[in-house]
Amino acid sequence: MFPLYDENPTRITPFVTYGLIGMNVLVFLHQLSLPEAQLNQFFQLYAVVPQQLTASFAGGTVQQPVAEWVTLFSSQFLHGSWWHLIGNMLYLWVFGNNIEDRLGHFKYIIFYLACGALAALCQWFIGMDSAIPSLGASGAISGILGAYIIRFPQALVNTFVFLGIFITTIRVPAWILIGIYIVQNVVSGVVDLQRAANMAMETGGVAYWAHIGGFVFGLILGPLLGLFNDDN
């Protein structure tokens, strides 16, 4: 199932959501222009590399022109593929506008970046010595989903459904759509931990614990920033 749009009207134009989508697309187009070697260097510089972040937290010197803590934010604008980008931007488009409407532009960008950074720290905590770059807007968008499910649990979301060779659209309550998303991530995250432990090695893939962490922090930070205040 892929969300298309929700049915909640907004009181303001979601300029920040549009801007975030535009920035993510522009950065990805820049990535596409880079040769493979330069792209790898770009990821090493602006994505979260847990090994380097751990060294910086311990007071060590990392030979990078960008401070490691900055990557907790810059990594949110990097993506590994077209599908990675499209999936994230689709969820941001569908769910971000109403959260921006409730929080207001300024608090929304603080909320978004904070959820993304805290989500990246959750993934870092799972594999502090990993040398695999962690990137993507998924942690921040999971925060938006966490805020959305408690603020608009009964909202209906128009959703693409694939039935074999047929494609149709149905209206699905937001809590079901987001609930499926988080259950999948929890199960996959536990399996990923078990697989890594059994293999005694690190593996690349989806940053499930960033998704879970972002969702939990969205549940917490949304109300703290005024998610339920109708006068925002």
Image: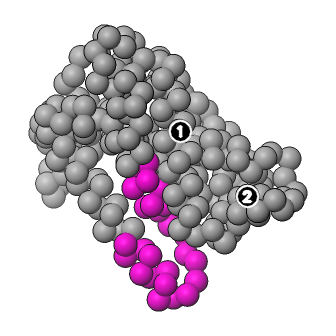
Give the residue type that dot 1 points to.
Ala
Q: Which mark is residue 114?
A: 1
Identity of the residue drawn at 48% across and 42% down: 115
Task: Tell me the amino acid under the disc marked 2.
Answer: Phe
Quadrant of res 157: top left
First in sequence: mark 2 vs mark 1:
2
In the image, residue 59 above or below residue 169: below
Q: Is residue 37 above or below residue 199?
A: above
Left or right: residue 70 compared with residue 90? right
**Residue extent of the magenta highlight:** 190-214
Residue 117: horizontal and vertical position, in percent? 56, 45
Dot 2 lies on which element? helix
Q: Is residue 173 left or right of residue 34?
A: left
Is 167 contained in the magenta span? no
Nearest the viewer among 79 and 15 is 15
Residue 32 appearing in the image: no
Provide the secondary structure element on which disc 1 rests: helix
Overall secondary structure of the magenta stretch?
Answer: helix
Q: Residues within 10 Å of mark 1 (few under 14, many from 20)?
A: many
Direction from residue 152 to residue 215 in the image, left or right: right
What residue appears at the point 47 percent right and 89 percent down from the top-left corner? 198
- Residue behind mark 2: 57
Q: Residue at x 19, y 51 (%)?
A: 162
Q: Give the farthest residue toward the front.
A: 224
- Give the number of the mark in front: 2 or 1: 2
